[in-house]
Each structure stands twice: as structure tokens, then as C-alpha cells.
Amino acid sequence: MDLPILKTLFDEEIDRRAVSALKTHAMVLGEGGENLFAAGVADMDFKAPPVVLEAMQKRLAHGVFGYETVPEGLLPALTAWLKTRHGWPVKKANILRAPNVLNILAIAASLFTGEDDGIIVQPPVFFDFYDIAKENNRTIVANPLILKDGGYTMDFDGLEKLAADPANRMIFLCNPHNPVGRVWTRDELQRLGDICARHNVLVVSDEIHGDITFKGHAYTPFAALGAEYADNAISCISPAKSFNIASCCSAFTIISNDARRKAFQVENSRLTVNKNNAFASVAMEAAYASGGSWLAAVLNYLEDNLALVRQRVKHIPGVELIEPEGTFLLWLDFRNLGLSPDDLTSFLRTKAQWAITRGPAFGTEGEGFARLNIACTKTRLASALDHLCDAIMKTDRIQQEKTS
Ligand SMILES: Cc1ncc(COP(=O)(O)O)c(C=O)c1O
């Protein structure tokens, strides 16, 4: 499909409230939050690719929704996608279906670590990593990312120390990293993989954002680094973010190690999480088989939105953009406003009408920050940036700083 034509698809304002979307729900926005700029939950405000909608409509028209197995075309479409786009040859036999990515993390934690064992995370990081560890009675062990000169890197010395502790048996890797937008390089992943292999720490790599990278930054699947890395990995793959089908798709666990894959399969079976949803199957197959040009167009649109934020934030005092390499989630640094976490949330909500995700949700390292989702129409984003700018300019504190 033609890129310029597709780009206009994303300018359409679609009322998310017409369905029970989480992003615009009172559960997330709070009471009285109907008119806020809803940019928290990590999905896109855009319709799924036309090829996905057509496949689902065709499936609906068939009218019979009895039990189904995995359609023949699904795994070949997925493996072709991983090979051609990301240079990752994956054997079909190594792929297991899962309801969603968080379910994979939870099963991996419960199967391959014991009660109270440590799971290493690198905050600021996706909040559900904490919940999964806690709910499975595991201990979260933090190896915070290093923020220097406006960019985040991994603390390999810190990781080596934590990995050397036999109580720490697993790491939840976020590749690319929500919320700081890093697309980890091959070299970084290799260093992490070598440390983990040396100390028998299993790498559970959440790669749900893998397809969403900006020009000049290529996603490297952790397990694509080589057979020895794959052998120490549980990879989590999903088309949820890439094609905006989070509520009607499932995920894939890719495990090279035979014993671990077998154990995972047995657990999936014990929990009976091995059923197939007809709409998920056709949506995912269509997305992987024919959604490439739509993805290219949406990435283009996101890059334009990113450019808009970059341009505007430059002129808003007290706000810095942490330059992302991928994901549609931006990590904004508000520390120069000098507000406490609660005051910052309240300021953004009441003065700027922004409902975005609080930084401390990602760990204490997120204090003074907040996460903005830019997968919305340019018009809404521009208007939200106007509101933020007005709110900050009106703040006495900033006015004083500006005149001193
Ligand atoms: C890094 C990361 N992993 C997992 C998820 C959720 O995945 P799922 O809905 O497949 O459980 C999200 C959603 O925001 C995410 O950002």
C-alpha cells in the first residue's frame, strides 16, 4: 500500500470511549477524567491494519466459532516475519502459544525460580515486572539503568554483582526498553547475556516492542545473538503493540532449550492456557503475513509525532525529552520543575489536563519523570503540548526562574 495514503489513516479521530477501552476508562483516568489527554496505557489510538480488519471480517462472516487449532499459515507467517525483518531464524517446533506476554513472564518465574528467589530488573522499567515477581512470591532485585548525558545505559558492573548471588536466578529483560525507549544494541545484549550465562541467570526477554524502532536503530532479538544465548533464554513475542491488536491477539513463547520448553509445555497444559481464539489467530496471521507496509506507515507517523514533541519540548522550560530509539512511549524528565511525584501528577492532571503514567510506577528511579504515549493523532498531540506549555508558563515558580 502507498505510504502517503496510509499515513492519513492515522489522522482519523476515533472515539475510544465507544468501547470499553482501558486508556479512556475511569479506572485509569479517575473520576472526572473524561476530558483529560489520555496518553497512559500503552496502545495506539489507530485502527488495526486494513488487512487485519478484512481477515477478521471474513472470519466473522464464516459464522461458526467452534474449537479450533492453530491455522496452518500462522507459524510460517510469524517465522518469516522474524527471519526477514529481524534476521532471526526460529524453528516452528520451538514456538509455544501463550495468552499474552505477561502470562509468559509469570509462568517462567514460577517454573524456573523458587519461592523468594531474586528476579533482576533494570529500572525504570515496565511496572508489571514488579507485580509479576511479587504475585509469584519472588524478590525483585534492582539493577538500575544509568542515566548520563540524557541517555540510559545498563550497569554491567552492578549486573555482574547481582548475577553472582546464587539467590538471583532470573532477569526480566525489556528489549526494547519500556519506558526509556532504548533499543539495546547487539553489544549490550551480548554483555548482558555473557554475564547471565556465567552465573546461571536465565534471561526472560520481553520483546513486545521489538517491531517499533526508529530510523537508525535496529532491534536485536536476544536469542538471535547465537545458539548459546538462545539456550539461556525465554523469548516473549507478540504482535499486540506493532499492529494495535492487544485485546484480540495472543503471544508466543520461543524456547530453544528442550528441557525448559518441555517444562513450559507441561505447565501450559496444566493451566489449560493452550486454547486458540479464532479472531486472534486470523488477526495475527494477517498482520505478520501482510501488515509490513502498514507498520512502515505507522512508524513514519510516530516519528513525525516524536519530531513534534522534540521541537515543542525544546521551548518548554523545565521539561526534557529522553531521546527514544524505539517504542511509542516517551520518557519525559520533569525534574527541573522541582515538584514532588504527587505534585507533578497533580500539576499535569489539573493544569495541563494530561493523564499520563507517573514515573514512580516504573520504580523509584522514575521520580520526577512521566511516560507519554505518542500513538495518537497529531492534532491531539499538538493540542496537548499547547496545554502543557501554557500550564508551565503560568506557573509562578517557572516564571521566577525565567526572570532570575
Ligand atoms: C514491555 C511490556 N511487556 C508486556 C506488556 C503487556 O503485554 P501483554 O498484554 O501481552 O501481556 C506491555 C504492555 O504495555 C509492555 O509494555
Image: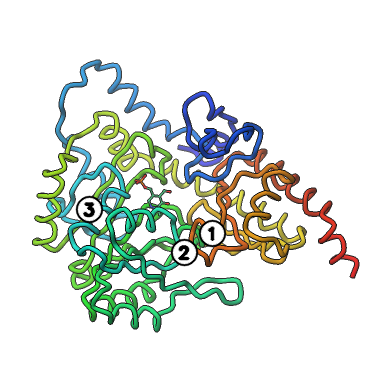
Looking at the image, which residue sits at the far right? 403
**SS under mark 1:** helix
Which quadrant holds the C terminus?
Answer: bottom right
Residue hosting label 3: 107
151 in relation to 9, above or below = below
In front of the other: 41 or 215: 41
Q: Residues within 10 Å of mark 3 (few under 14, many from 20)?
A: some
Q: CA distance from mark 1 to mark 3?
A: 26 Å
Q: Residues within 10 Å of mark 1 (few under 14, many from 20)?
A: some
* Residue 157 drawn at (x, y percent): 39, 84
* Residue 98 drawn at (x, y percent): 23, 45
Residue 15: mark in rendering = none
The picture quadrant where one finds residue 395 is bottom right
Residue hosting label 2: 217
Tell me: 44 left or right of 261.
right
- Please tell me which residue is depicted at 58% across the width and 35% down the height of the picture: 8
Which is in the foreground here, disc 1 or disc 3?
Answer: 1
Residue hosting label 1: 360
- Please tell me which residue is depicted at 27% across the width and 75% down the height of the picture: 196
**SS under mark 2:** loop
Which quadrant holds the N terminus?
Answer: top left
